[in-house]
Structures are given as C-alpha cells and as structure tokens.
Image (tube, rainbow, N blue to C red):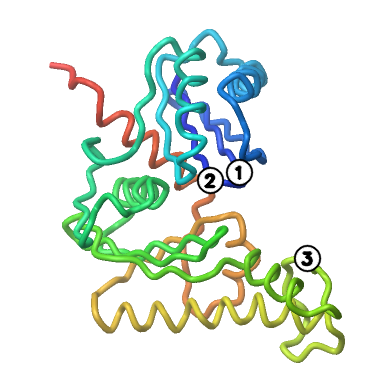
Amino acid sequence: MILTLSLNSLTMTAGFYGESSRQVFRLSVSPGRTADDFRLQLAQLARLSGTEDRLRGAIIASVAPRLTQAAAQAAHQLCGVRPYIIGPGLKTGIDIKINDPSQLGADLCAMAAGLAARYPLPAILVNISEATTLSYIDDRARYLGTVICPGLGIGLKSLVDSAELLNPVPLEAPERALGMNSDESVRSGLIYGAAGMLDALIARIRAEHPAETLVATGESARAVLPHCKEAMHFDEHLLTDGMRHIFLRQQPRKS
C-alpha cells in the first residue's frame, strides 16, 4: 500500500492505494499545521482505510511550501521510509517544456502524468479548483504550457468582499442565464461564465495545437462541465492517481 498526499494552502488530499484498491480523503488544513498534527490525522485516516500496518511508501505533491516538510516528516513516521516529493529530479514521465520547469506546480505535474498514463495524447487538461487551469500535453508527453484563471471560489469571494449587497451563494447553476435576484445573478455569472470561458480558451488552444482529448478534474468541475459546449472526460481522482503513477516510476524494475 502507498500513500499519496496532495497539499495546498486550504486542503489536503490523502489517497491510500493497493494494487487494485483506492481510498481518497479530502480535508481542510490550517497554515500552522505541525508534523505531529499531520501524523495524528494521517494515522487516523490509515486506520479508517485499514492500511495502517501495510503502507510501504508515500509521495507528496505540494503547492504549500510552508507545509511540505511537516507533511513529509509525518509521512516518514507513518510509512517508515522517506516520501518522494514531486519536483525537479523526480521521474514523472512528463517532459516539461515551459521556460522554467521548476515553476510548474507539483499538482499540475502529477495530473499531467496521470493523464498521459491513461488517455490518448495530445490532450488538454482542465483543472477547476482554487484556480482554474488549462494545460496542454502533446503526443510525446511534453508539457507545453498552461492558462491560469481565478477559480470559482476566488471569484465568489472577490464579489462578496467588494460589494456589500452580495452574499455567498452555492456554486450551482441557476435555471436561466438572466438572474431574477442577486443570488441567481451571481450564480449565473460564476457557472455560465466559467463554462463559456473554458469553451473559448479550449478553442484558442486548439487553434495553436491539435487536441481531441479533453480531461477535466477538480472539486468545482461537476458544477461547470454540464454547461460547457465542449465534451470532457471527468476524472475525479486524476491527481492522486497521477501521484501513484509517479511513485511506481521510481521503483526498480523487476528483471
């Protein structure tokens, strides 16, 4: 069994993988989380998944540098071996062709690895999370670039913070594009606006690079994808599955 651990400043996603099994947990985190905090939480998750005595390794994808080492210490204590940390020098199967490969987020690298392992290339990878990103991976598994846009949560927070008469709303599409009240109007702008933006950006990327495969992931994808004109494969566990794929690439090949 292996542990995959994805971290950003708001959430932790922990995956427990056997040869033919997968259990994934998503939890909130706080900026001051210590190694002991992570160890206790991961030990509890390991017990829930029934894997506490069977973990043989771990891999971490972190875009929260302040939390990375604390999480790595906790994973080391839980698994008995030092975890792999996705970054420069680790074999991923993806040839990163942006100007400075070290600038590519570990989460996007892991998603690209998961996509390349499971779907036909070339492909566009759409991640609708804290940020909304579109990435292009060509038919030689080369990562050629990314579009980064504000996520739905960031857009909603910006509206609420800057307009006293607007309130938080659920990220669900209204029945019609023209809202009949403030809540419907905000939901329409967020959901239909995101869907229209994705369609337009996919068209722009395709004008520069061929891509028949479209794969989407992220916690807000379910709200947006039904309203896109472009049909996309939805892969809920692309991130953690990609991390597992990278972990296995580090293992010695059997003769």
Residue 228: x percent and y percent?
55, 77
**Whether label 3 touches label 1, CB < 8 Å:** no
Q: CA distance from mark 3 to mark 2?
A: 22 Å
Tag 2 secondary structure: loop
Disc 2: CA contacts within 10 A as few (<14), some (14-19) or many (>=20): many
Instruction: Please name the amino acid that badge 3 sits on.
Output: Pro
Q: Using the image, determine if residue 170 lies above or below residue 243.
A: below
The quarter of the image holding the N terminus is top left
- For the residues carrying marks 3 and 1, which lies nearer the camera in this image? 1
Tag 1 secondary structure: strand
Which quarter of the figure has residue 47? top right
Position of residue 36 in the picture relative to residue 144 (left or right): right
The quarter of the image holding the C terminus is top left
**Whether label 1 touches label 2, CB < 8 Å:** yes
Tag 3 secondary structure: loop
Name the residue that disc number 1 marks.
11
User: Residue drawn at (39%, 37%), measured in percent from left and top?
Assistant: 243
Residue 162: x percent and y percent?
73, 77
Of residues 18 and 148, which is closer to you in this image?
A: 148
- For the residues carrying marks 3 and 2, which lies nearer the camera in this image? 2
Residue 3: x percent and y percent?
47, 25
- What label sits on residue 8 in the rendered view? 2
Instruction: Please name the amino acid that badge 1 sits on.
Output: Thr
Name the residue that disc number 3 marks.
170
